Image (tube, rainbow, N blue to C red):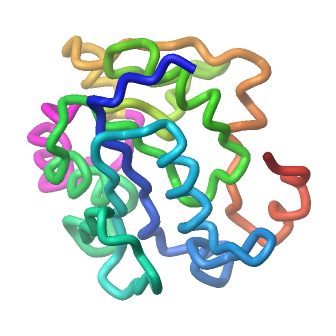
Amino acid sequence: MNVVPEVAAALLAGGKSSRMGTDKAFLEIEGVPLWSRQLALLRSVLPAQLILSANGTQVFPGLAGDVTLVRDATIDAGPLSGLVATLEASRWDRVLVIAVDMPALTSAFLGNLLGEEAAVVSLDESGRFEPFPAVYPASAAALARESLRSGRLALQGFLRSCVEDGMMIVRPASAGDASLFQSWNRPSDIADLRPLP
């Protein structure tokens, strides 16, 4: 796996989890909470900085001291709020960002994204961006903050602006990528996504 270490890696864990009925970050796989499992996945690609984005109420028992914990920039403003906090906290130009509710992701796929040596986002067959996982430019923090301030919370619009401004390149998603992008949104999704890596 060709991993470039001069990147930050971030986990967005602060979602409301309203459809799940409980905080998804603390659901467990073989006794390990998702937040801990996903941080371990990010560690596997050897980032120079590790960031955990959370909402204001979450507490992560045993969180390692080398993890930068940031809080959502705005309450109840969706993943863009966590992305703003993450990009602003990064000490590196590129930030690999994943969501806590995507347990099918693999280190091989993340390594391939980092191998692009640019900020990169996947585009699915329907023409929609896959916001996570993606490698964001830390320089997009100002654009993300302005989008948040003006109430433009949809990541599709934000990503379109990043691509049009030349801050990110597009990587067409392959048919095999679809299973990696699945997320745990409802209790029924948990059974559907096994077996996991």
Horizontal arrangement in the rendering, residue 106 relative to residue 120 (left or right): right
User: Residue 120: x percent and y percent?
Assistant: 40, 21
Magenta: main secondary structure: helix
Horizontal arrangement in the rendering, residue 85 relative to residue 122 (left or right): left
Residue 136 drawn in magenta: no
User: Residue 23: x percent and y percent?
Assistant: 57, 80
Q: Nearer the viewer, residue 44 or 37?
A: 44
The residue under the point 37% across, 50% down is 10
Figure quadrant of the N terminus: top right
The residue under the point 51% across, 53% down is 99
Residue 150 drawn in magenta: yes
Residues rendered magenta in the picture: 137-156
- Relative height, residue 170 to residue 50 (above, below): above
User: Residue 27: x percent and y percent?
Assistant: 68, 76
Q: Nearer the viewer, residue 1 or 23?
A: 1
Q: Nearer the viewer, residue 149 or 84?
A: 84
